[in-house]
Image: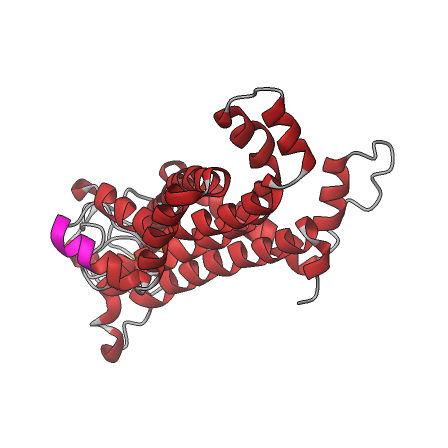
Amino acid sequence: MFNKITRADTPFTRFLQGFFSSRIATFGFILLLLLLLAAIFAPIISPQNPYDLEHLDVMDSRLEPGKTSMEGMTFLLGTDDQGRDMLSAILYGLRISVMVGVTSTVIALAIGLSLGLLAGYAGGRIEALIMRVADIQLAFPPILVALILLALTGRGVDKIIIALVTVQWAYYARTTRSTALVERKKEYIEAASLLGLSPLRIMFRHLLPNCLPPLIVIAALQVASAISLEATLSFLGLGLPVTEPSLGLLISNGFQYLLSGKYWISFFPGVALLAAVVAINLVADQLRDVLNPRLQGQ
């Protein structure tokens, strides 16, 4: 796609050429872009607002895909048990899921990156304390930690973001600390220390750029993991409330109707969730290969 770019041989153009050299990665990027645009512009492109009671009619409950309501509206993906258009509900649910996944990942990255830099640069007791806390965090399954936190704090977007941040930050801290330990012993860090630069400037101006490549890949993978974990928690009834539904909650709403043949209520949200996770993972895998060519093909 970008193989014909020859005029400006810059690191960015080389990155684009490497990334789009894979057809699978290009497909994943396009799919991810379409899903993000659908989530962002959901209020504009949705046939209806599925959470506005004025637009709902119980007579349209559990209509099959392609059926038309008495008012003349065609539901391409059918309706759920409350008469909501499934296409609209999926677009709105995708918006919430992506927002929760991206927000929790960004916050966890900021916390883990800062603590990892501090541990790798300072060493000693500070490093031991941060790493022991991270080890304790990583010793427990993420879903177990999230379940306990949500059981204590209750449901809500802010609550589930806090739970997801809690189970993610340790990955970034350990990766950053490992990279910082290697970079701390190099000459440019010693030179910066001899010049009297402050520890904060050394950490964020000199150590940080060398820690970013592996963190970018981990962050991309963790977005997919956060979306999946949020969907699992919402499916179990401990995630988001019904007033702020996500893809996991939509799947949960239709689960009880699967045996009666009303497959579309759970099936289409499940397809949307699968597409989002697959697209993010395809992009993350290619980012890993481009940022670290030695890992290509592993």
Residue for point 51% across, 46% down: 176
* Residue 267 magenta: no
Q: Main secondary structure of the magenta part?
A: helix
Does residue 79 appear in the picture of this structure? no
Q: Looking at the image, which is closer to me, 294 or 52? A: 294
Q: Position of residue 39 (x, y in %)?
A: 42, 43
- Closer to us: 136 or 52: 136
Q: Is residue 141 above or below residue 69?
A: below
Report the colour scheme: secondary structure
| Number of numbered discs overlaid on the protein picture | 0
Task: Report the residue at 60% width, 35% height from top.
Answer: 209
Q: Position of residue 61 (x, y in %)?
A: 20, 60
Q: Residue at x 46, y 42 (%)?
A: 123
Q: Residue furthest top?
A: 196
Q: What stretch of residues is rendered in magenta?
A: 148-153
278 left or right of 57? right
Q: Residue at x 29, y 45 (%)?
A: 161
> Residue 33, position in %: x, y?
55, 45
Occupied quadrant, residue 79 = bottom left
Query: Which residue in the rendered view is the most extreme toward the bottom?
Result: 259
Image quarter in which the C terminus is found: bottom right
Residue 165 drawn above or below residue 206: below
| Whole-percent x, y for residue 270 in the image | 38, 64
In this rendering, would 1 be left or right of 239?
A: right
Q: Nearer the viewer, residue 7 or 136?
A: 136
Quadrant of res 202: top right
Residue 206 visible in image: yes
Q: For this rendering, which residue is in front, 47 or 145?
A: 145
